[in-house]
Image (spheres, grey):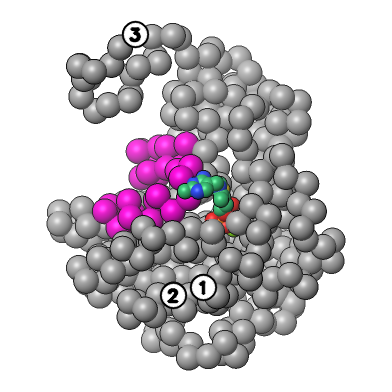
């Protein structure tokens, strides 16, 4: 931890049809678990650290959520991790080519938000994008096939790892340009407000995106028009190999929302309960017409920036420190300590996931590549756009 101040707390079938991955809570359900009101905008760094520097012991003495929620979190996060461990292996075997950014370590950032939102809310993120659709219910087959650049992939094999899309689960990508999804998230929020749907958009970004000019324009407009958006910075301490401290004068990134009077708060995102509560509070504000929130998820990626990064810019101790607060282990521990399920039950979930992941690999291997006539399709909305040339 010498380099970064980021400090987290405690610790099927052969098709692309939707998986049995657990779905988001129905409307209204999440609100019941919201603690109200919670202070936003801690005034000082000390307050922020107090909010995120909780002790390692992660097992709550009293359970805040029902048993099903813990089991759903466990299953979702294990699916993300096992899927990506396999993807990493396959990349090593050159079955997956191009770019591949793994989310391993950051799983709670997604699982805690899925449980706090509804299935009609919209999601958008950067290129570290396999976990979000997996938790929203996109078939692992369709995602793995996309990583293999196969025609059966969720972006027809033309997007690859950085451009996973699935309209059916309201996952609007998957974006490779750092920060590009931030104004897009504001635009999606604008559409939801304009159409009076009552839905919101959650827009994720990395810490590297916070210094993009587009973010500041989007924040201003989102506040001015009180758009139903939850902006989330997944602060994993590094943009590629460059620490937050080396690129930002403001290292408590949630402070950046203050320039726009946007309610903003730090969240210990190694803890799935904290993520859920923060997102639920932000969602309630958005649905009440009070506009956007900026959440700084303090998290960590266990792997390098991408598969080609040996991550020499950080220490082994720093990595081990975060591993000891692993969010999946924490939920597992809570489940067992509170006897919500037995070891055997969890093993059965693990086995199910292993089979799902294996099936996704076989599905991807056995799928065809896109044909040449796909090359110019899906480039422009207008099918007969006149300026495309063979
Ligand atoms: C506009 C733009 N500039 C630079 C890049 C190259 N680039 C790709 S990823 C990345 C780092 C972003 O890091 P961060 O936002 O912290 O996300 P993380 O990878 O940690 O999830 C950079 C600079 C890019 N894709 N887009
Ligand atoms: Mg980062």
Up-down relation of residue 311 to residue 367 (above or below): below
The residue tagged 2 is 256
The residue under the point 52% across, 30% down is 160
For numbered disc 2, what is the local secondary structure? helix
For numbered disc 3, what is the local secondary structure? loop
Whether residue 11 is visible, yes or no, is yes
Up-down relation of residue 177 to residue 235 (above or below): above
The residue under the point 59% across, 60% down is 108
Up-down relation of residue 138 to residue 56 (above or below): above
Residue 175 inside the magenta-drawn segment: yes
Magenta segment range? 163-188
Distance between the Cα atoms at labels 2 and 3? 47 Å
Residue 295 inside the magenta-drawn segment: no
Label 3 beta carbon within 8 A of ligand 1: no
Distance between the Cα atoms at labels 2 and 1? 6 Å
The residue under the point 46% across, 70% down is 295
The residue under the point 59% across, 24% down is 148
The residue tagged 3 is 390
Position in image of residue 353 (x %, y %): 66, 40
> Is there CB contact under 8 Å for labels 2 and 1?
yes
């Amino acid at each position: 931890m010498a380099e970064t101040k980021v400090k987290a707390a405690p610790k099927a079938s052969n098709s692309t049809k939707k998986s049995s991955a657990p779905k988001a809570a129905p409307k209204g359900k999440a609100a019941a678990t919201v603690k109200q009101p919670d202070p936003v905008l801690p005034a000082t760094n000390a307050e922020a650290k107090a909010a995120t520097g909780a002790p390692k012991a992660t097992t709550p003495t009293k359970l805040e959520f029902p048993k099903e929620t813990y089991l759903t979190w466990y299953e979702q996060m294990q699916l993300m991790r096992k899927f990506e461990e396999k993807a990493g292996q396959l990349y090593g075997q050159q079955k997956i080519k191009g770019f591949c950014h793994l989310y391993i370590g950051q799983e709670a950032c997604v699982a805690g938000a899925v449980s706090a939102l509804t299935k009609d809310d919209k999601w958008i993120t950067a290129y570290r994008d396999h976990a979000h659709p997996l938790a929203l219910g996109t078939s692992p087959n369709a995602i793995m096939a996309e990583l293999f650049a196969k025609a059966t992939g969720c972006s027809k094999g033309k997007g690859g790892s950085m451009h996973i899309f699935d309209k059916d689960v309201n996952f609007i990508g998957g974006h490779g340009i750092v920060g590009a999804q931030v104004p897009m998230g504001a635009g999606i929020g604008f559409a939801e407000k304009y159409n009076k749907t009552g839905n919101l958009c959650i827009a994720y970004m990395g810490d590297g995106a916070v210094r993009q000019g587009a973010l500041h324009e989007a924040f201003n407009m989102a506040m001015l028009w009180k758009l139903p958006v939850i902006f989330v910075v997944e602060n994993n301490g590094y943009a590629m190999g460059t620490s937050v401290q080396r690129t930002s004068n403001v290292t408590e990134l949630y402070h950046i929302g203050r320039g726009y009077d946007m309610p903003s708060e730090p969240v210990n995102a190694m803890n799935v309960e904290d993520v859920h509560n923060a997102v639920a509070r932000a969602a309630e504000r958005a649905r009440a017409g009070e506009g956007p929130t900026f959440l700084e998820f303090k998290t960590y990626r266990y792997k390098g920036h991408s598969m080609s990064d040996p991550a020499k810019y950080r220490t082994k101790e720093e990595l081990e420190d975060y591993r000891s607060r692993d969010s999946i282990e924490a939920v597992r521990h809570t489940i067992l300590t509170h006897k919500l399920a037995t070891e055997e039950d969890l093993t059965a979930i693990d086995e199910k996931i292993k089979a799902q992941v294996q099936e996704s690999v076989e599905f991807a291997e056995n799928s065809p590549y896109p044909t040449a006539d796909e090359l110019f399709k899906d480039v422009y909305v207008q099918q007969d756009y006149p300026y495309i040339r063979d």
